[in-house]
Image (spheres, rainbow, N blue to C red):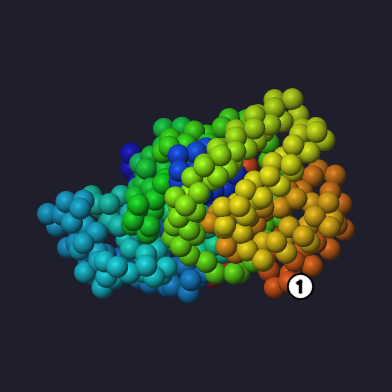
Amino acid sequence: RAPMQTREFFVSAPGKVILHGEHSVVHGQVALAVSLNLRTFLQLQSTSSGEVHINLPNIDTFLSWEITALQPLLAGCKDADLLKRLREFTRISEDSTDTRSMAVLAFLYMYLSVFAESLASITVSVWSELPTGAGLGSSAAYNVCLSAGLLSARGNISNPLTPQQESARWSKEEMELINRWAFMGEKIIHGNPSGVDNAVGTWGGFLRYHAGNITPLSWVPVLRILLTNTKVPRSTKVLVSGVKDKINKFPSVLKPVLESVSAVSCVCEQTLTEMAERGPSAEHYNILEELIDINQHHLNVMGVGHSSLDTLCRVTLARGLHSKLTGAGGGGCGITLLRPETDTTVIQSTVEELKACGFDCWETSIGAPGVQQHSSAALSQHILKILSSY
């Protein structure tokens, strides 16, 4: 296919949260990952400047390169060599985990690989509603947007948007291609990722993850939630190894806990499927709330709770709302389920009290659509202004 004729276009992808199964998934149990409707937006413009520009306002990174300087990196280059050459070219060391450096490296690698036959002058701007480093799939949403944007610009995938539409999705085959390239970007940033985050960013909705197999669930409801970032820093590596130590110390005590968490994931999956098929009922929401409470207790048993997360659970439960940690625990983020009938004043007062505790808090939803192309009319003035100001 010929490269795109459109001068600019817009793409977005969602973040992700683990609804159930964090930590136990590391030990071969079932987890449910779900798209988070805090989104990352990309604007790609074709230019005639002879340069490639990348603008990442969230991490204060604005860089450009002459195409003539990038061209030699491809000369007689095998895939494995390109990353090595890019590291030398950008002076980013092998052991660097700096967010800016990794984002730039992933962009250049994807751009040079996709446009290898003929490097095009483009300006790419990416802005996200997601906080970085909070376990919400911000790097995957970035990589999914880059992948969809660059593949569309190169003509490897179609431009699904018709003039009458505000938003559109690609075909299944095209989405699989987007996901594969996004996974390459994730490997550059994280080394050895599971592939769950980029799959959620691509497909959206709910995904079942078990022993390396990722299965998107069809027909799932969108659920309203509060997402809270306690802003308590933690090391995923330390928390994961702490759980492993506990299992080794008390195998007969901890293994049933892991199996119980897996069962929570499975019961939740059945409940969500029923909600989608028959329409949600009050009893469905009761079950979802009980499962949230059970899983949160299990995570405390595993030793990945934190006083900040206890505060979140206490503040929300005082208003009849149910919360659990999501991701690694030890601080980080938590989710609170909102029922359809939950009153706006209740939500507002909960958010205010959580913010008074020093937390960040958003009202959003889970189960949102995956990667999409948008017309400029579909995006808020706020987002357009940010993307178009570079």
Q: Could you tell whether 388 is left or right of 340 in the image? A: left
Q: Tag 1's secondary structure?
A: helix
Q: Which residue is mark 1?
A: 356
Q: Residue at x 54, y 45 (%)?
A: 254
For this view, does 171 lie left or right of residue 108?
Answer: right
Relative image position of residue 62 (x, y in whole percent): 42, 73
* Residue at 68%, 44% in the rendered image: 294
Examine the rendering and report whether any part of residue 148 can be seen. Answer: no
Q: Nearer the viewer, residue 107 or 301?
A: 301
Count all numbered tags in the image, as a single digit: 1
Foreground residue among 50 and 105 = 105
Residue type, numbered disc 1: Ala
Q: Position of residue 85 (x, y in %)?
A: 20, 63
| Quarter of the image with the N terminus in it | top left
Which of these two is toward me, 369 or 310? Answer: 310
Graded by Cα atoms within 10 Å as few (under 14), some (14 to 19) or many (20 or more), the crowding at tag 1 reads few
Q: Is residue 147 above or below residue 49?
A: above
Q: Visible in this render: residue 134?
A: yes
Q: Give the residue drawn at x 57%, y 58%.
A: 304
- Locate residue 247, reporting x and y percent: 48, 49
Residue 222 to residue 388: above or below:
above
The quadrant holding residue 345 is bottom right
- Tell me which residue sits at (42%, 68%) in the image: 99
